[in-house]
Amino acid sequence: MRVPSGEHTKQNGVDVGNERRGGDERIPVGVVGTGGMGGMHAYCLHRKVAGARVAAVSDVDADRVGKVAEECGGAAVFGDAVEMIRDGGVEAVVIASPDPTHAELVHECLRLGKPVLCEKPLATSPEEALGIVEAEVEAGRKLVQVGFMRRYDPQHVDVKNVAASGAIGEPVLFKGWHRNARIPAGVDSGWVVINAAIHDLDSARWMLDAEVREVFVRGLNTTGSSVGELDLQLIQLTFADGRLATIEVNVDAGFGYEVGVEVVGASGTAYTAPPSGATVRLDRGFTQKVDGDWLDRFEPAYTIELQEWVRSIESGGPPSPDAWDGYASLVVAGACIASIRSGKPEAVPVPERPGLYAGEATGVTR
């Protein structure tokens, strides 16, 4: 909760008064991780988001963190993320460090009562994510937002709004496609699910406003890698109410980065538009630019996501997507990995929502 101008108080031993801010009304945010994703968040907060400022950045790479700090107006630099989170000059935290660090750092934010936007995945396993949900329930307040930025992408939001309006009839099928140019070295099939497909799993839950009850995954190794990763995966989902979804994830597509969705209704469909760049006709053909990676494609969504996160802190409203969404997506991801191993459909054992999250839809139409 924001402290009114001129007031001064503490939350869990952390000084959050406007006096400490030196009269600056903006929320001081600390960013953990200054690589491509963390750097994007830091720059968006510094240049494009109202109501917040980058107060501190942390990273083990001293050169990289120093450059980001300088470009964000001279933010404080920390080599240790926990030390930064505990600092009294930081009131809210963005976590964009490597996946295995997420759960521990989110728990530290919850312990201190600091709002946190954590990049996906919320944790590296459903069990770790459930621990975060339980800690938040025990605290009695929703402080965690998960970085499923597609929920803030204007194209995805348009499709969501059309589906929710009833204009295409009852939505009965979700189709998603997610193509990366190249697969990182040394990854396996589980990585493809946890780090790539998890966005699509959340999109399916959000678009159809329902929980998944069964998954079936088939895949191919198109690279000839000895690691044996399934870089191309076709995921089939069945929801609790019988509706369906199909997701194509190709992390070695070669041509560039492309993401899209279609929601099929009983009387029509709605789908994301193709890239909006100029179409060039030349040499008896025509071409259109394809994005190079997710940072190019979703930069507007990251900005909107951060702005809405800051507004939720200012207003005291609940963050979205929340820790439950982060947990539920990991449960589905875990079932997908089990299906890859078994070669069979696998059930998705999602327990009943705790009261803190009960009665909420899987997403908010914006």
Image (cartoon, grey):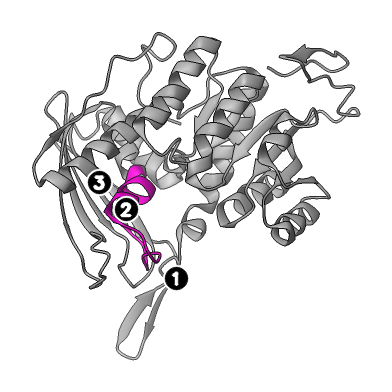
Residue 178, placed above or below residue 129:
below
Say whether disc 3 or disc 1 marks the residue closer to the N-terminus: 3
Judge whether residue 9 is colored magenta.
Answer: no
Say whether disc 2 or disc 1 marks the residue closer to the N-terminus: 2
Does residue 50 appear in this view? no
Amino acid type at image mark 3: Glu
Q: Which segment is the magenta one?
A: 179-198
Residue 107, placed above or below residue 179:
above
The nearer-to-camera label among 3 and 1 is: 3
Where residue 103 appears, as percent x and y from the top left, is: 50, 33
Amino acid type at image mark 1: Ala
- CA–CA distance in space, label 3 to label 1: 23 Å
Task: Name the residue that disc number 1 marks.
Answer: 278
Task: Name the residue that disc number 2 marks.
Answer: 192
- CA–CA distance in space, label 3 to label 2: 21 Å
Where residue 13 appears, as percent x and y from the top left, is: 76, 15
Q: Which residue is drawn at 25% across and 28% down?
A: 166
Amino acid type at image mark 2: Val
Where residue 266 appears, as percent x and y from the top left, is: 13, 34
Say whether disc 3 or disc 2 marks the residue closer to the N-terminus: 2
- The circle on residue 262 is 3
Residue 99, placed above or below residue 5:
below
